Image (tube, rainbow, N blue to C red):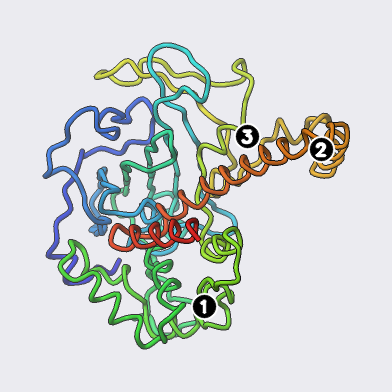
Amino acid sequence: MEVTAAAQNQCWPIFVNDYISSLKMLPIPEMAGTVEVPEEKMCKSIPQIRITGAEMKVSYLVDHSYVPAVDASTDNLGIWNSRHRSTTTRTFLVKGSEFGMDDECEFIVRKRMYNHVNATPSGGVRKVVWTLYRTDGIAFRSLVSYHIAKGAEVIETTHGNAKRIKQVYKRTYPSAIRRMKELRRTLAPREVLPVMVAEQSGVLGASDTQGLPRNKTQLYSMSRSKVPTSMKCGVTSNDTLMEGLFKLSESAVEWNNLNSSLEERREDPTSTAFVQNCSSTSSLSYVEVKADESDVPLSNRSNDVGASNQNHMTSSEFKTQLVDRLSRIPCEQRGEIRAKLEHELDVMFADKITAEVEQIFDDSSRANVMERLLEMVNH
């Protein structure tokens, strides 16, 4: 598989020469930061993989202080999935040695298993991405583990309908695509690339073309006509606070709200798998949360148990019951009740905006965005 000259000169530190596909082998303390990891074993950019024909079992520890969590599963090996071979995703709740409820877990670990669709022989190139989240939903570190069999290779594929093999498909980092969309709100396509190059100058791994627009076509296809009007326009003085916040957030990629997923999926402890004594360096236990086979955001997964429950409340039923209860409240108390409901909605919306700002904007622009939102509140 193609690797740029700059990437060939760059060396990514190997955390361990082993393929970690089992929860029992996962170095939770190192991923959580409770055990110090030497600087020379931490990756501050996405590793570029070279397939030489020799068997390779290797794992990299990626620090999300430098690498966005959305980029952890993106490498230089092209397309991993197909219609008939998708990513398998599982989620584990990590807690201390004592049993507790889901909301008392210490960490959340997400496991994504890949089997390269264009590898020969079939199953010759595998990958597991372990991402550790704090209970507030913020990703801390990821362990990216590869197993490449002896003699295995990846068949190069072109991008889209390209006819020339030199146009080998290489996925653009999701964080780079988000940045392109953000810049396209105010800049013409020809102006986006220079800005992104300037932003990445001097940053480790900036020479990696996956962090930049693939070509001009990618930018021009991201036409402003496809960008929602609210992304092109600022917040006007006539907008209410809620309308203004929606304009800033409605086009953002939805944050994988891990807290919401935990609240939505309260499973019977008798049906939950527990794994004890998984690490020799700590007394951690794990609670596995059932997940779909496809790689979808955690907050979008449906609860099979809840969906099959005939007593599950629908939106229309909720509306009917809410109206009925409000109608029974004495007139002199309705204002207070409505104020409480509106406050709860404000809190939930503020949580959503805060999470999206953390996910979408980098450190250089996040403070300005937060100040802008706070100024709107003062108006």
* Residue 251 as seen in the image, left or right of residue 3: right
- The three-letter amino acid code for the residue at tag 1 is Lys
Mark 2: few/some/many CA within 10 Å (<14, 14-19, 20+): few
Q: To which quarter of the image does residue 264 belong?
A: top right
In the picture shown, does residue 107 fall above or below 250?
above
Q: CA distance from mark 1 to mark 2?
A: 37 Å
In the picture shown, does residue 154 fall above or below 222?
above
Q: Secondary structure at mark 1?
A: helix
* Residue 368 as seen in the image, left or right of residue 258: left
For the point 78% across and 37% down, which residue is it?
A: 334
Q: Secondary structure at mark 2?
A: helix
Name the foreground residue: 350 vs 55: 350
For the point 75% across and 36% down, which residue is it?
A: 307
Q: CA distance from mark 3 to mark 1?
A: 34 Å
For discs 3 and 1, the disc positioned in front in the rendered view: 1
Name the foreground residue: 332 vs 266: 332
Q: Position of residue 274 (x, y in %)?
A: 49, 18
- The three-letter amino acid code for the residue at tag 3 is Glu
- The residue labelled by disc 2 is 322
For discs 2 and 3, the disc positioned in front in the rendered view: 2
In the picture shown, does residue 323 fall above or below 124?
above
Mark 3: few/some/many CA within 10 Å (<14, 14-19, 20+): some
Specify which label sits upstream in the sequence, 3 or 1.
1
- The residue labelled by disc 1 is 232
Name the foreground residue: 12 vs 193: 193
Specify which label sits upstream in the sequence, 1 or 2.
1
Q: Secondary structure at mark 3?
A: helix
- The three-letter amino acid code for the residue at tag 2 is Leu
- The residue labelled by disc 3 is 264
**Circle 2/circle 3 CB separation < 8 Å:** no
